[in-house]
Image (spheres, rainbow, N blue to C red):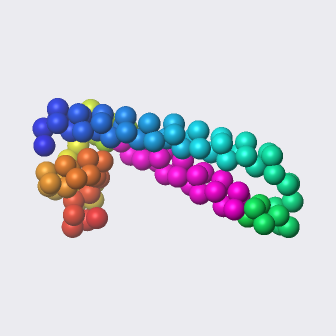
Amino acid sequence: MSDEDARASLAVERERTALRLASLRGDFAGVVAASRDTNADDEHDPEGATIAFERSQVDALVHQAVAHLAEVDAAVGRLDAGTYGTCEVCGHAIPAGRLEARPMARTCVGCA
C-alpha cells in the first residue's frame, strides 16, 4: 500500500468515524434530554433502568469512536514519521492485506 493510498484510506476512515461520533453525541444528548422528562427515581421506575442502560450504551459507543479517531490520527502520525506499515513489536513490515483491511494496524498478524 502506497503512502498516498494509506492517507486516502485513513482520511475516509476519519471522516466516517467523525460522522458516527457526531451522530452518537446527538443520540446521547437525546437520551439525556428524554431522561429529564421521566421520574428521577430510577430504582423504582420500570423505565428508569432502560434509560440508564441506553445512556450507558451510547456513552460507551462515544468513547469507542473517540478512541478510534485517536488510532486513525496515530496512523497518520506514523505516516508522517515514515514508520507506517512497520510492526511496532517485531519491526517487520505489516502485510499490505492487513493494512488494507485495517489501515490503523500497529502490528503484523503474528504479533497481533
Q: Residue at x 26, y 52 (%)?
A: 102
Q: Residue at x 24, y 39 (%)?
A: 9
- Does 107 sit above or below residue 85? below
Residue 20 visible in rendering: yes
Q: Residue 37's spot in the image, x, y percent? A: 80, 46
- Does 51 sit above or below residue 103? below
Residue 19 found in image quarter: top left
Q: Residue 80's spot in the image, x, y percent? A: 27, 32
Q: Residue at x 30, y 34 (%)?
A: 11
Residue 11: in magenta span: no
Which quarter shows the N terminus? top left
Instruction: Give the magenta part as a residue range.
Output: 50-72
Our reading of the magenta stretch's main secondary structure is helix
Q: Residue at x 25, y 65 (%)?
A: 111
Give 36 or 11, whichever is nearer the viewer. Answer: 36
Residue 110 found in image quarter: bottom left
Residue 86 visible in rendering: no
Q: Residue 58's spot in the image, x, y percent? A: 58, 52
Which quarter shows the C terminus? bottom left
- Does 6 sit above or below residue 51? above
Left or right: 51 in relation to 107 = right
In this rendering, the count of numbered labels is 0
Give 111 or 65, whichever is nearer the viewer. Answer: 65
- Does 11 sit above or below residue 35? above
Residue 61: in magenta span: yes
